[in-house]
Image: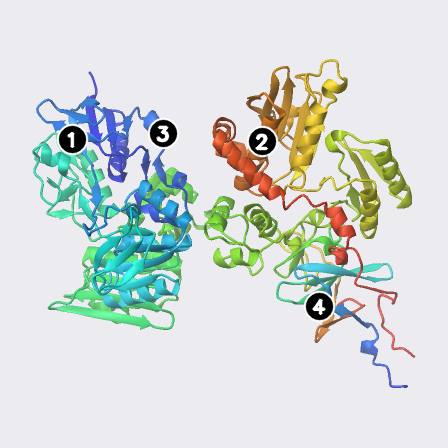
Amino acid sequence: MTKARLVIVGNGMAPGRMLEHLFDLVGDAFDVTIFNAEPRVNYDRIMLSPVLSGEKSYEDIIIHGDGWYEEYGITLHRGQKVVSIDREAQTVTSEGGITAAYDKLVIATGSNPFIIPVPGHQLDGVLAYRDLDDVDGMLKAVEKGGRAVVIGGGLLGLEAAAGLKMRGMDVTVLHLMPTLMERQLDPAAGYLLQKELESRGIEIKCGANTKAIHGDGKVEQVELEDGTLIDASLVVMAVGIRPNTQLAKDAGLEVGRGIVTDAFMRTSDENIFSVGECTEVGGRVYGLVAPLYQMAKVAAHHLCGLPDVHFTHAETPTKLKVTGVNLYSVGEFGDGPGVEDVVMRDATRGTYRRVILKDNKVIGAVLYGDVADGGWYNEMLKSGQDVSEIRETLIFGQAHQGGGAVDPLAAVANLSDDAEICGCNGICKGQIVKAINEKGLTSLAEVRAHTKASASCGTCTGLVESVMAITLGDGYAKKAEGMCGCTDMGHGEVRRLIKAKELKTIPAVLQELEWKTSGGCAKCRPALNYYLLADWPGEYKDDYQSRFINERVHANIQKDGTYSVVPRMWGGMTTSSELRAIADVVDKFNIPDVKVTGGQRIDLLGVKKEDLPAVWSDLNDAGLISGHAYAKGLRTVKTCVGSTWCRFGTQDSTGLGIKLEKFMWGSWTPAKVKLAVTGCPRNCAEATCKDIGVICVDSGYEIVYGGAAGLHIQGTTKLGTVKTEEEVMEIAGAMTQMYREQGFYLERIYKWADRVGYDTVKAVIFDDLESRRAYYERFVYSQKFSQTDPWSERVSGVDKHEFNPMAVFNAPATVSEPAE
Amino acid sequence: MNAPVNENQLDWRLIGTIDDVPVQGSRCVKNGDTTIAIFRTVDDRIFALEDKCPHKNGPLSQGIVHDGCVTCPLHNWVISLETGMAQGADSGQTAAYPVRIEGRDVYLKLSPKV
């Protein structure tokens, strides 16, 4: 028997979720084909704002990667907009001429942003806020700077405004109504929100009616009805959405505000379903994710012939995804007969809370500032319970019921099994508890994977963790995923935010990213120091107190507190005068041990700290500089003698090694970097276990990378073969720069490449000449600030205090007798 | 002058000013064979510990100063600047010395806290 053919028009969040339900219910009973007008996989549209503000990246918000489509055998036509449905023949046809036959069809065409047709709305620089292309457009405008005018003071408009402000633009919000977000917030909460956004430097004009947008080819000014002119380089229209119903209308389906369906998501054609923002069910259209996911679930059941689920309207709470702004609103808040209000304000703390009652039942709630009780009010709203008995303490929240102490865990423990925890996905407490118990889940990531709770917008993460703590008891230890105990943020997040928020000092990072300790710790400070150094070359001043001692005194500390000193020997080559100078230093300072290192140079072991400046001075005089044998930076470039001497040598491997070392020394990197150039595939210089290796062959140079020979042993991966030394230099510089920009502190090149993908590194550094060049140039630029010999710097007096005692005494250690 | 010598002042010594010690850094004071590390925190408090980690005698003056503690450069033990006690799972104690600030001058008592 052949499988039923299911065709889906649209690849947004609703159909994605519908397919997940479908696969859960009946496995691969359907042969699925998706047409997507966007050239992408399915991503989380609610998370566009964090992408705009720089707090997340596109990769972070992908819901279904390519692998998912493959796993389920889904045919995905990207960038193929469906233009017609033939209901007789049961086929759809795309713009590109692809026709697919269906047994069941699901229309999920979503919505289009509404663009106000004022004069100038077609100018370059006028954008909607709907998909990743819009975000890309905004980020391009950010690079040019100037002022952004956001038209629309609703949820999307304000998120766009906050994101653009975080990216460094001047921002003005124009809102037609007298207060912000008037559909979700009452005027009091709207006012608090406006004050908060204004304190962040966002200009807000309510009651502002846009008359025209002016500009010669591109946006230059926005004119209001009252004649005010505002300079602008970007206009974002976020004034609402229109269900995209054209396709359905053309096919003769019943269309009202949206594509009309029954409570089973079936359109006027029994073989055609509709889900998502394009759908009108029960006379309403929806834009928030929770009801859209409900549609997805209902449609999946009916596609499988399981008629026990139907769509019901529920009030959906609203939250604003702007970091640091907490507001929650659900239900109704207008005045009317029989409607009563309970209000609590704390003007100093900027919190506001209002619960709206009718017939002793909660019908709405608006919370600003402290929103932890939002879910509790929503639960009462949904259950319709009589609240007259708790009315006196209702406004103080759940923790104050029964006079108990404020304990967030107790509050969560008191929630009923039906209490909704995750609004986006409609997951209630009982489902999470059941999943934890039945599947033995112990981590947040597992709970997200199995229940979807907190997997969308993430604002309920704290609640989900509380549910886990209650269910698992002592078995649940919250796993810190942060870079250290000072923050819950991981290295990647911190690096991204340093760039996005243009943080240029360690105190700025600690403050803006809300470090939990006042001054960081020995784990995060060296990492931050590196990130700032790598991200702001020439601007950031190295913080020596945030460096490990070796990098502070440019020598390696030994077990007895003495140091070892390793001068650079370019490509492992040295001369009689250098060796003589080293021998003299050894004698003069009574250095106990001299050893040849694995990196083809000489290590002087057991130097006293106070002798270091004098040792360096003598070595400097002979032309020797620091070998950075202690550095998270370029260590050595190991070479063999190559074509100069060796009868098998194919190229001048020694010469190339010296060139590479002279080019790259002094650069700071996430972890140490070791190179090698070997003159033939016999590999005497052991290039195949280095971070970057070059293997000379007759026709040129084979470049390999990602090797390791320490705690972990790993051979290198081949990058490619080039013909000239210049190309080798450019690639080595570019790859090192990419690693410098993306690597996590202490993460070696092989680990970084494992994480970002060897294919990606190859595509960016080897295949794409333009991006290779860009990385190379950034490396060259940063080298301008890093090639100062730290030894000569210290000899000239920098950080002299490091090496001299502050005071010297010769008193007995303990004085117990009074002097006579 | 033959003013009576206050016994408590006998082993107090002026060692320099706060500004001689880098913020979140350290300097050493030598007293015979003993090295005393002087630390300055991010909020300008000054502490003194014997320059020896209770673990393997690592020079604490070479460590990273943070959160009222110093992390030893040899094996990352974290030592309290106030008490000299090892933090976390490690146990051990380094001698801590009393320090007094007058204006920006730093005085060190050459016998450790009891």
Residue A110 versus residue A790: which sits nearer the camera?
A: A790
Q: Above or below — where is A274 with respect to A812?
A: above
**Could you confirm whether marks 2 and 4 are on the same chain?**
no
Residue at far top of view: A647
Mark 2 lies on residue: A730
**Element carrying mark 4:** helix
> Residue beneath label 4, please?
B18
Q: Is residue B65 left or right of residue A438?
A: right
Q: Which residue is mark 3?
A: A66
Residue at image location 53% in from the left, 41% down from the top = A741
- Secondary element at image label 1: loop
Q: Which mark is residue A489?
A: none
* Callout 3 secondary element: helix
Is any atom of residue B57 visible in this view? no
Against A716, is B12 above or below? below
| Chain-order first, disc 2 or disc 3 | 3
Residue B6 point in image, percent of width and height: 83, 81
* Three-letter residue code for mark 1: Gly
Q: Which residue in the structure is indicated by mark 1?
A: A305
Q: Quadrant of residue A576?
A: top right
* Chain bearing mark 1: A
Mark 2 touches mark 1? (CB < 8 Å)? no
* Residue A816 can be seen in this image: yes
Viewer-nearest of discs 2 and 1: 2
